[in-house]
Image (cartoon, rainbow, N blue to C red):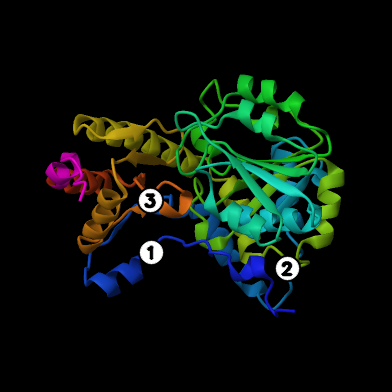
Amino acid sequence: MPLVPPYIESLAPYLPGLSIEEVQREFGVSRVVKLASNENPLGASPLAIEAIRNHLDGLNRYPNGGIDLRRVLANQYDVKIENVIVGSGSEGIMSNIIRTFLCDDDEVLASEATFAGFEVLARSRGVAYRTVPQTNWHYDLTALAAAVNDKTKIIYLANPNNPTGTIFTRQEFEAFYPHVPERVLIILDEAYFEYAKDNNRYPDSMHYRHDNVITLRTFSKAYGLAGARIGYGFAHEELIRNLMKVKLPFELSTMAQAAGIGALADKEFLYRTLELNSRSIRYLTGAFREMGLTVVPSEANFLMIVLDSEQKAASLINDFLHQGIVLRHLKQFGLPNCIRISTGTDEQNRICIEAFQERMQCLTQPTSSR
């Protein structure tokens, strides 16, 4: 009997984007424009930072398990505290879902070209992980419904989807949902919902509830708290009750909980974040299309560009790193000919576009068949 199960031994870990410090050290550059990890270019919410400072004196005490943040979230979204869970990023809650609800013979169903981190978590349980293709860079909910079988236990849906930036509509979800058995748990990953919520077609899951749906959200993106690792979720109290049995007892940290509560009160920072992102998406999309590049319309804080070969995508990523510009190659997401570009400040966006303009001749030349 091997010490490490075969499904763990063969598992490829999720690879995060390079940090600014890693790029500076490896490529010898002083200026780094990081547009690889969908982080907030404005930094963190000032009220969140202030809240962290105000709680430094309590570091010798154990946290209270996030109950204060759960109470604030319940009040803001008009649900009971029993309907709310918090964790170390939305991935932390995903991990608890995997541990809580999956048995050995169960299967997980997802779309191709979606968040690679969830696939790593699902496969770490040793269960079957099945996918269906997308249609024009969008979820094919009809195909997902048709793929449900007697072993399907969890369906993972990211809306907006990472890395494509696309959404499925409320009409599409309402047509899909009746085909899902009640015994199947639907994970609605809404990590980027703040950027899409003003789209009239976006199905904000807090406007309707289903007993077998758990909504996951995060403070990492719009609130600029990726380093604090704060995720939260909403679901039927029976789902939350069982997840709480598996959740680490002192998760979140005292600092993370304080930051989350402070961030929720910072309406001005959220407004500035969304205004900058809207301006950045318009600017980047227009500039890339003027260059003749294929840009997938996005409802998130990033864009996906489709090139005609893996070679061009990998070469561009490498060349930009030597200039101190960090983009994300999407090979791990099953899209080797695509790159993802996070929105930045106005200055960072300009630097990125100028770098692309310098590379346009290489990007538009046909790939050699040799």
Q: Which one is nearer the viewer's eye here, 89 or 182?
A: 182
**Quarter of the rendering containing residue 142:** top right
Q: Name the amino acid, label 1.
A: Leu
Secondary-structure class at tag 3: loop
Secondary-structure class at tag 1: loop
Residue 18: numbered disc? 1
Residue depicted at x 24% and y 52% = 316
Is 368 within the magenta?
yes
Residue 109's spot in the image, x, y percent?
Answer: 66, 43
Label 2 Cα neighbours within 10 Å, binned few <14 / some 14-19 / many ≥20: some
Left or right position of 212 against 331: right
Left or right position of 285 against 86: left
Q: How many marks?
A: 3
Q: Are marks 2 and 1 in contact (CB under 8 Å)?
A: no
Residue 68 visible in rendering: no
Is 161 within the magenta?
no
Q: Kindly report which numbered mark, 2 or 3, lies closer to the viewer in this rendering.
A: 3
Q: Which one is nearer the viewer's eye here, 92 or 183?
A: 183
The segment highlighted magenta reads: 359-370
Q: CA distance from mark 2 to mark 1?
A: 31 Å
Q: Which one is nearer the viewer's eye here, 357 or 137?
A: 137
Residue 271: numbered disc? none
Q: Which residue is mark 2?
A: 63
Q: Kindly report which numbered mark, 1 or 3, lies closer to the viewer in this rendering.
A: 1
| Residue that extends furthest to the front in the rendered view of this protein | 370
Q: Earlier in the sequence, mark 1 or mark 3?
A: 1
Q: Earlier in the sequence, mark 2 or mark 3?
A: 3
Q: Which residue is mark 3?
A: 41
Residue 325's spot in the image, x, y percent?
Answer: 26, 56
Q: CA distance from mark 2 to mark 3?
A: 29 Å
